[in-house]
Image (tube, rainbow, N blue to C red):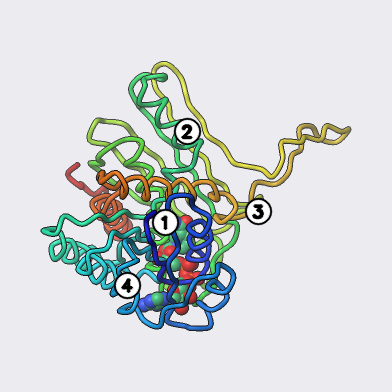
Amino acid sequence: MVGVAVLGCGRIGQIHARNLARHRRARLVSVFDVRAEAAAPTAAELGVPAARSVEEVLADAEVAAVLIATPTDTHVPLITAAVKAGKAVLCEKPVDLDIKRARACWAEIAHRKPSVMIGFNRRFDPSFRALRERLQRGEIGTLELAVITSRDPAPPPPAYLKGSGGLLRDMTIHDFDMARYLAGDIAEVQAFGANLVDPDIGKLGDIDTCTVALRSAAGALVQISNSRRCAYGYDQRIEVFGAQGMLQAGNLRATSVEHWGSERTAARDPVLDFFLERYRQAYESELNAFVAAFEEGRPMTPDFGDGLAALRLAEAAEESLLTRRAVDVGG
Ligand SMILES: NC(=O)c1ccc[n+]([C@@H]2O[C@H](COP(=O)([O-])OP(=O)(O)OC[C@H]3O[C@@H](n4cnc5c(N)ncnc54)[C@H](O)[C@@H]3O)[C@@H](O)[C@H]2O)c1
């Protein structure tokens, strides 16, 4: 049994805490949130203590690993403190908004050979995982084109957007990781961004719509399509294409029932509305992978380096938006 504490009891922290509480090979030891009122309901629901400080969590010998589900700007200090206390870490994405700060964090802890996994949950979605395995088995030949579609149902509140780091670092970061997951190292990035959904997002200096084109070091082309608004729900699809055909993984629906009538055919339930529902199984599988790697002393993946690589692509895409040129990332 791996003893785990959850730091941050917000939207995603609650999901992880519940998954840990019912995990067969992990034990939820405690939860902590800087707002005691946020930790109390989760602690009560799951029957674990709410710790009074990060220090208390890190001093607890029962805690072998921490799951960091706090706002992004706290990830680097919390990863650093947890690793120095000898704990394994599963930290939510992104590692940080600033690649220099993220690199400095790694420089400070790398000599300890820490076990750090980054929460790129989409790698653990059963369909995306199966698609990648079949791609790697050569079912469609060498990868030539990949299309990654990721559109949120509605923009987050302005308060979240202010601290989010912008569309590319907050949202597209998942797609940059998927691009690497499917196509390997990336050599070149070109981004187009627009403010088409909500003028208030533009006033914050952010974009709400983008397409990003990437060229992999092996020569494949990847296209990412993002929007902060999607009328039919949370649109999450992947397509890979090669000489022998195509593999596609599509959206999930609550049921597979179809209605065929006089006005339309094959009408189905809307796609699952947002990440907590769409990636429910992925969060569970991510945790299973973390616990198994910890128990078996295997390297964690996706690791800190994957977190840095995705952030580097976000930074390059931002540079491309500003310069209106493709950016060489040296893959
Ligand atoms: N992988 C995914 O699908 C996914 C989805 C959502 C969010 N995230 C990431 O998870 C992180 C949290 O996002 P969220 O939407 O759950 O945020 P949230 O605001 O809902 O929750 C964050 C919680 O952390 C608490 N907190 C703040 N500073 C803290 C600290 N130093 N120690 C302990 N608790 C602290 C806050 O009080 C809050 O309750 C972000 O980095 C975000 O990018 C990932």
Figure quarter occupied by ligand 1: bottom left
Of discs 4 and 3, which sits in the foreground? 4
Identity of the amino acid at label 3?
Ala
Task: Tell me the CA gap for discs 3 and 2.
Answer: 21 Å
Q: Which residue is mark 1?
A: 193
Instruction: Measure the C-alpha gap from mark 1 to mark 2.
Output: 22 Å
Q: CA distance from mark 4 to mark 3?
A: 47 Å
| Mark 4 surroundings within 10 Å by alpha-carbon count, few (fewer than 14), some (14 through 19), many (20 or more) | some
Does 108 sit above or below residue 145? below
Mark closer to the chain start, 1 or 4:
4
Foreground: disc 1 or disc 2: 2
Residue type, label 4: Asp
Q: Secondary structure at mark 2?
A: strand
The residue that appears at 58% across and 58% down in the rendered structure is 229
Q: Which residue in the structure is indicated by mark 4?
A: 60
Q: Are marks 1 and 4 in contact (CB under 8 Å)?
A: no
Q: Nearer the viewer, residue 249 or 290?
A: 290
Per the rendering, the mark at residue 231 is 3
Disc 4 to disc 3: CB gap under 8 Å: no
Q: Could you say which is closer to the camera, residue 72 or residue 229?
A: 72
Q: Secondary structure at mark 1?
A: strand
Q: Nearer the viewer, mark 4 or mark 2?
A: 4
Amino acid type, callout 2: Glu
Dot label at residue 239: 2
Does any portion of residue 161 appear in the rendered image?
Answer: no
Q: SS for tag 3?
A: loop
Across and down, in percent, residue 4 comes to 39, 62
